[in-house]
Amino acid sequence: DAEDVTIIDESLAKIEQTRQAKTLEDAVTGLVADEIQAPKITVLPERKKIRILIVTKDATLCAHDSVSQLRMAGYGDLFEEVHVIVLTTEKFDFGGIQVRDNVWIYPTSSHSLLWSLYDGYRLAKRELYFAENFRADVVIGSDPFECGLLARFLARRYSRGLYIDVLNNFK
């Protein structure tokens, strides 16, 4: 029995057809070619990119043309949408900034770090939840503590994937 194969990328279609032809040739050895049914190949026109939400405490993201902000802008090439919630007690005179056409940064500007968790939730609900749908496909916490806690809550609340980024050794 042949299985249906779905190819996501045009360039992979030729590679897959070559592989199938070789497999088919190997299978035909000693058999009649009419008895073997080749799998059906479907090529999708464009691969869908994912939308991410990053929860971080890196307040330098809010500084115009900072290294961190430019790095986040670069993520715009990799993902369909990038939303960043910055848990911070620093006061910013803006509610959110659009770094690129698909990259947004939202500082919480909270009274305390504890309040920033609640403010981060409110920001996510206000900016990313509309038409009964949460915009992000994956929620990323930049540390396993405050950011990870909020990321876990949002991922569970909206049934999304969760990724906790641990860069330090906490021995």
Image (tube, rainbow, N blue to C red):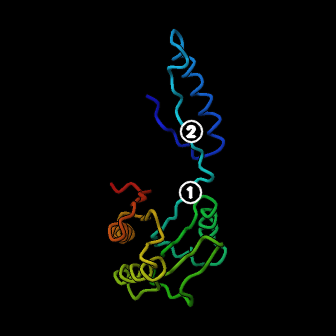
| Residue in the image at 59% along x and 49% along y | 44
User: Horizontal and vertical percent for residue 88?
Assistant: 46, 80
Task: Report which residue position mark 1 lands on.
Answer: 48
Q: Residues within 10 Å of mark 1 (few under 14, many from 20)?
A: few
Q: Label 1's element?
A: loop
Does 64 appear above or below 73? below
User: Horizontal and vertical percent for residue 101?
Assistant: 65, 72
Toward the viewer: 98 or 112? 98
Q: Which quadrant, please, contains the C terminus?
A: bottom left
Answer whether labels 1 and 2 touch (C-beta < 8 Å): no
Please tell me in which quadrant of the rendered image residue 87 appears: bottom left
| 151 to the left or right of 62 | left
- Identify the residue at the far top of this view: 30
| 129 to the left or right of 29 | left
- Identify the residue at the far bottom of this view: 93
Toward the viewer: 49 or 95? 49
Q: Amino acid at mark 2?
A: Ile
Does 79 appear above or below 41? below
Q: Amino acid at mark 1?
A: Lys
User: Horizontal and vertical percent for residue 18?
Assistant: 62, 28
Toward the viewer: 115 or 10? 10
Does 95 appear above or below 105? below
Toward the viewer: 71 or 21? 21
Q: CA distance from mark 1 to mark 2?
A: 19 Å
Task: Report which residue position mark 2 lands on.
Answer: 41
Please tell me in which quadrant of the rendered image residue 147 appears: bottom left
Marked residue nearer the N-terminal end (1 or 2): 2
